[in-house]
Amino acid sequence: MSRRPGGLIGDWAEAQRRQQQTQVIQQREAERRLVAYERDRQRTQERDANRSHRQFREGEALRRTARIEAEVEALKGLLVAGCRGPAFRISALARSEELEPFNPGALAHPVPMPHIEQFQQQSSGWTLGSGHRAQAEREAHARYTEAWQAASAAEAQRRRQLDAYRQQYDRWAAEQLAGVRAHNSGLTELAAALRGGDAEAAVEYFSAALYASAAWPEALPRQVAAAYDPAARQLVLDWELPGFAVVPEARAVQYLPSTDQDKIKPRPVTERRGLYRDLLAQSMLLVVRELYAADEFGVLDSVVVNGFVDAHDPATGREARVVLATVPAQRSAFAGLRLEQVSAVDCLVSGLGGLLSGRPDQLTAVRPGRRPDEVGGGVVSHGGRAAGSDEDEPDLFAMDPIAFENLVAELFRAMGMEAVTTQRSGDGGVDVEALDPAPIRGGRIVVQVKRYRNTVPPTAVRDLYGTVQDKGANKGVLVTTASFGPGSYTFANGKPLELVPGADLVELLHQYGLRGRLGGGAPAQRAPEPAAPAGDHNVLGMSWSGSVALDVCALVCTGNRVLSEEHFVFYNNPRTPDGSVRARAHAEPDKAALEVCFDALPAAADRLVLVAAIDPDADPHADLAGFTDAHIRLLSASGEELGRLEVSDGRAGETALVLGSFRRRPNGDWDFVIGGKGYRGGLESLLGDYGVDVA
């Protein structure tokens, strides 16, 4: 028997085994290469991320250093910058007789009257016989008559409202004009008194010139007490100087990649002292320059300035007034100086014979020159309470900064809390510390005080939030004599922050038996606003399913940019300046409502954007996942439902949503365009896209 050719089978099997081994090796090699690729890609991404992070941190350190250098340069150039400013003139106090013009808004437009042709056209489809045509014509005429009567009634009502508003405006304009003329007449009398050498007039005028001067940065104090000696034609005053803390302790900021931290490079103490001493000398010279520049009536032959700081006596803990510099400046000697080129310290001490503390950082005092209370007659103070005015309501704008902080602390104590003011240097951004003993809602409160005239920027609110976190406080309160914009309220929303604008501060002071007012008299009044004509506005009623709490807001925009912060209508700004968009109480079944007069919207506006955002006070962890079955009811002024506008549902993780926008068409009509864009950063993130500053 012959053998089977098993060798062939064996060779084939061996080839198959080797092929399988090769495939396994190739697969393992491919997997190894894939792992290596993923590892290299991850390393590259991490390296790129680390590089980007490092570049950002290094850039931020450079920006902080640049800000510090800019602050120092501003301090060094105070005198030069001040000398470039315009001289104060009594004409700057004059008020214009030009008032806001009469602007009736939508009342200026007559109600459109119907035309018979419009109704005949509606009936033109009736063509079946003369009887039908006659009936159609009678019905068209009846509809026309009804529409004409309604339009005539609306027009008569518009005219009555226009006449009433005109009378209201005329009364307001007459009152405003009388007040302006009385004020300007008082300035004429003041000028005459100044020319006659009246001491009281001189003190009031020159004190106001210093206090209102634009030469002083907002961060520097401007408290002044003055008296005038008519015989010597000399003005004597005490002027508050900035404290040592105004000179930055840091020289630069450096990012250290090894620890991922910033390193603060301190400014040498000798350099800080030198900068501070030079700043005090500049301040003294600038005061003298401002006084002589403002002397348009030629009543000054000499000026004596005593520069002081308010500090705490370490022995008693009470406030003390420390004089750090003094200078007697004759007009003849001062007129020959070129202040833009002098060394401030040498000019003050050697050129004018003044005194400057050798160690002002340690509050080493100098002997003051002639003081206001040594002159005789009345001493007038700006930035503090004037002598003899204890029975008057103190002006918060003019109050001494320390006195203002003490008043705020006293308010907190009157509200049942423990409150103390902090040291002016090294306070870490805290002016008053308070402790609320109330359970649950109480705790430690840090308070910042801003004696501003203009709107407080959102950056101040951000800084306060950082201070709250840094100090581990339960709440931060920002108190100001000014106001806050929507950006500030938006940032504070949902955070342990409370904003107290000037109007609310005055109300709180009066509520708790304290005194204070904003400015020298009643605030300037705006022209009265016309009431929206009956039937002229629409109501937008917002409804949705779910229990999520929302704030519904509106932005009056040109394109995707809000016209101004005042044209952002929300819980702290319930109406636009012209009243064309207003928040209003809602009625069932709506959960929020707005009132809109489309015809009265500003001519520059081409869209009204409606947005909704989670109310973090109601539920800080909520999102828009529960915002479903949402719609807007378009209602007439009488409450008749004209239509429903559907809007998009919310999505998980998002906390703000653009509901939609009404857009003005070329023919003047407004069409609704559904929105749907959501934001995870809440209302703050959404507003950034529309130009509202919340940074």
Image: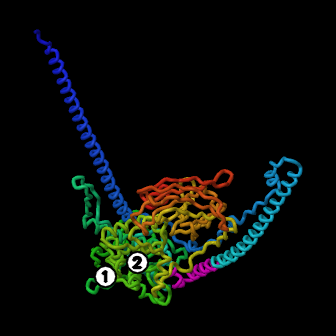
Above or below, comparing residue 331 to residue 632 in the picture:
below
Say whether residue 190 is magenta: yes
Residue 234 showing in the rendered view: no
At mark 2, the secondary structure is helix
Q: Tell me residue 398's x, y (percent).
A: 47, 79
Image quarter where the N terminus lies is top left
View extreme (front): residue:
1
Q: Which residue is mark 2?
A: 401
Magenta residues, start to end = 181-204
Side of 577 where 268 appears, left or right: left
Residue 584 in which image quadrant? bottom right
Crowdedness of circle 2 by 10 Å Cα count: few (<14), some, many (20+)? many
Crowdedness of circle 1 by 10 Å Cα count: few (<14), some, many (20+)? some
Give the overall secondary structure of the magenta segment: helix
Tag 1: amino acid = His
Q: Which residue is mark 1?
A: 312
Colour pattern: rainbow
Say whether residue 578 is magenta: no
